[in-house]
Image (cartoon, rainbow, N blue to C red):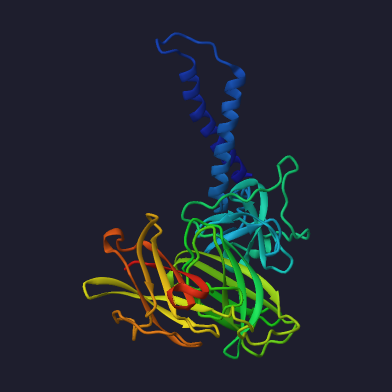
Amino acid sequence: MSHRFFRYLAIFSIYILILVPIITACGRNNRGANVPLDANALATAAAQTLQAQSAILTVQAGGQAPPAPPPSGSTAPVISASVDTNCRIGPGPEYDKVGYLGKGQQAAALGKEPSGNWWLIANPQNPAQTCWVWTSTTTLSGDPASVPLNQAGSGSQLPSQPDPIEPPPEEGFMSATVDFSSIIVCSQSSWAVFHALNTSSLWIKSVETALLDSATHRNLNTGRSNRPFLQAPQGCPPGITDLKPGSEGYFAVKFPPSVDVGDSIDATVTLCSEPNQVGKCASILVTFTIPAAMPPPPGPPPGPADISMHARYSNVHECDNAIYVTFEIQNAGSLEINSIDIGLTNLDSSIGVGHTNLNRFVVANQNSCFPGTSPFTSGQVGYTLAIIDPDFVTSGQSIESSIKACSEKDLGGVCTTVLVQFTYP
């Protein structure tokens, strides 16, 4: 009884101490005149004061504060793109692209596909729409178990929205479409050939392709190359050129003989705007099945029209007071090459910067000077030159070389033309 009496006495004393200043302050205006009191307001203030002081006494008596109110909500896990990543209308490479998540860009994880390979996010370019990004090119911050499972397995769009339209890529953003083309055999090795369309404003100058067995997740091979694009869909590696914006081309990666017909292969293709996998890059997943019949090794078709050539840039050097561009060439056809014509164009200024027409075009090495020799026999590998005008080209500019090779002198007989791009050093 005594404890309870003193507790109420303390509360009453605090009530008096608080109430007296309230009455004094509210009973006068700034000039000291009497002002009528609002009884309801006074009662409310007193009740609030007693409630606060009761809480203070409870803390002092029990030693613990009342529990904090629960948080108003939790933050959804966040997806971050490790490279520029396509966002598709469904969870798979067969679905159309409707947006992209740029490298370092983040988005809330709205759902996950049952296999755990795709995250559902709001389309960064159209927040009213959802789309899917691949888990291998993104990272999740947060608890994966808190991400709801999406059994529908496809992105959704509000009915009031029009059909999805793929936005144009941002300036400086690497984007491309890649699909499996065929299997070829070169030098007794099997190669998977892929078709690429450059949909960005940047050149594609290097490609990395990682092959993975879809069933066992076993790494089969990873191929990297600069100037990776082949002369033709059935041409043998190495590649000879880069891929300019808006163009399409083919590249290849070797895979081991341990794969079997019908095996499903996941290919992660990373395309970059600079050599050696640097610059702006984009990664694309392509899934394909090893075909039932492997093609025979490529060989020259019969007939007089069999002339073929591979060419790639070698270097720029000075010789006899002139500046030369050297190309490594290979006669891939059955006919001799007896004449060659090389035209050089500055792609940055669209100005011709060199032209060379030769019957004696084969030089000893990449630092040689004219004159050269001919003919260039079937299967032979060597070097040829073209003179470039240094007054119309500067370091870092892109040069396109149109190389025409013919089976007869003075560009006669059967001819073929290849394009080679390089950066002027």
Q: Is residue 138 above or below residue 410?
A: above
In this rendering, position of residue 156 left or right of residue 392: right
In the rendered view, tell whether residue 359 sits above or below residue 49.
Answer: below
Direction from residue 69 to residue 408 in the image, left or right: left
* Left or right, residue 370 beside residue 65: left
Q: Nearer the viewer, residue 274 or 8?
A: 274
Q: Position of residue 202 (x, y in %)?
A: 47, 59
Q: Residue at x 54, y 56 (%)?
A: 106
> Residue sitting at 26 percent across and 60 percent down?
391
Q: Residue furthest left?
A: 321
Quarter holding the C terminus is bottom left
Residue 396 locus on image (x, y percent): 34, 63
Residue 323 position within the rendered picture, expressed as x and y whole percent measured from the top left: 27, 70
Picture quarter containing residue 353? bottom left
115 or 28, nearer to the observer = 115
Compared to residue 329, the image places residue 75 above or below, namely above
**Quarter of the figure with residue 424:** bottom left
- Foreground pick, 146 / 277: 277
Quadrant that contains the N terminus:
top right
Name the foreground residue: 213 vs 64: 213
